[in-house]
Amino acid sequence: MKLPVWIGTSWKMTKTIAEARAYIEHIATAELPAGIQPFVIPAHTSLAAARDALPAESPVLLGAQNAHWGPEGAGTGEVSMRMVGDAGARLVEIGHSERRQHHAETDETVALKARAAVDAGLMPLICVGEPVDVHEAGEAIEFVSSQVRAALGRLSSTEVSGVLIAYEPIWAIGEHGRPATPTEVAPVVSELARVAREVSGGVGCRALLYGGSVDEANAADLLLDANTDGLFVGRAAWTPEGFLRLAAIAAEAAGVP
Ligand code: 13P
């Protein structure tokens, strides 16, 4: 891994405004360890409240779970990149498998959103991951490297170096998921690192994260991999206590005192 170690959570479809505020106030008063880059991705409805609850000096970056690629206008039910930036997002999640599966997100819309995010001054957090049948067929590497190439296809090599990529195998995510083992993650992340270097003129992307049933028991082992720069957590970080414990594990894994 390279420093800082990214440790973040998407709250997915959870938390009212009051719950979001309480969570952010909790982590803002705790002392976050050195060597990590924490991030929190609220639902759109609580993003501005999270921003308002976060002290200006906090290292926590806020993100949005999705935004449209187009300019503002006729897009009922959508929000633009500029709008999520205005509400406090510094990064924007693009192409999470839940959106690819249930909300018609495609490689093409992911690439359009990555382009729009960069144009709006937001850091894209591009999620890729294979379904279980592809995993079992031993074709995960081809599948996710094709997703990443497509996602980065509208960015310049310099812009690619600012992108975050999360490897989240679909079979590992959520309450029915099984966490991938470090042995399963390593070859995929290694190939993603190679692809990112290739399309960025040798620099690589900003950070490569793993996500999918990360918890306090497996976090340290998952961070042993040389190409894994952080963890993208769902359920295990939906409480501020869980988030802080994972942040401490990440800092320890990074060897930061
Ligand atoms: P879980 O950690 O709940 O499996 O979710 C992971 C995820 O999808 C993060 O984006």
Image (spheres, helix red, strand yellow):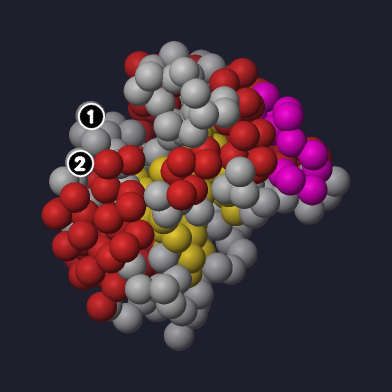
Tell me the number on the disc at residue 14. 2
Of residues 157 and 214, the one drawn nearer to the viewer in this rendering: 157
- Give the extent of the magenta segment: 149-160
Q: Residue at x 40, y 49 (%)?
A: 87
Pick out the residue farthest to the right.
Answer: 201
State whether residue 142 appears in this view.
Answer: no
- Mark 2 or 1: in front is 2
Q: Which residue is mark 1?
A: 176
Q: Quadrant of residue 97?
A: top left
Pointer 2 or 1: first along the chain: 2
Looking at the figure, which quarter contains the N terminus?
bottom right
Q: Give how far across and how far down residue 130 sits, in percent.
A: 48, 24
Classify mark 2: residues with Cα within 10 Å, few (<14), some (14-19) or many (20+): few
Identify which amino acid the numbered label 2 is placed on. Answer: Thr
Taking the magenta stretch, the answer to whether it contains residue 143 is: no
Q: Quadrant of residue 252?
A: bottom left
What is the distance, in whole Å, between disc 2 and disc 1 at their CAs?
Answer: 18 Å
Would you place residue 106 above or below residue 180 in this image?
above
Q: Residue at x 44, y 20 (%)?
A: 75
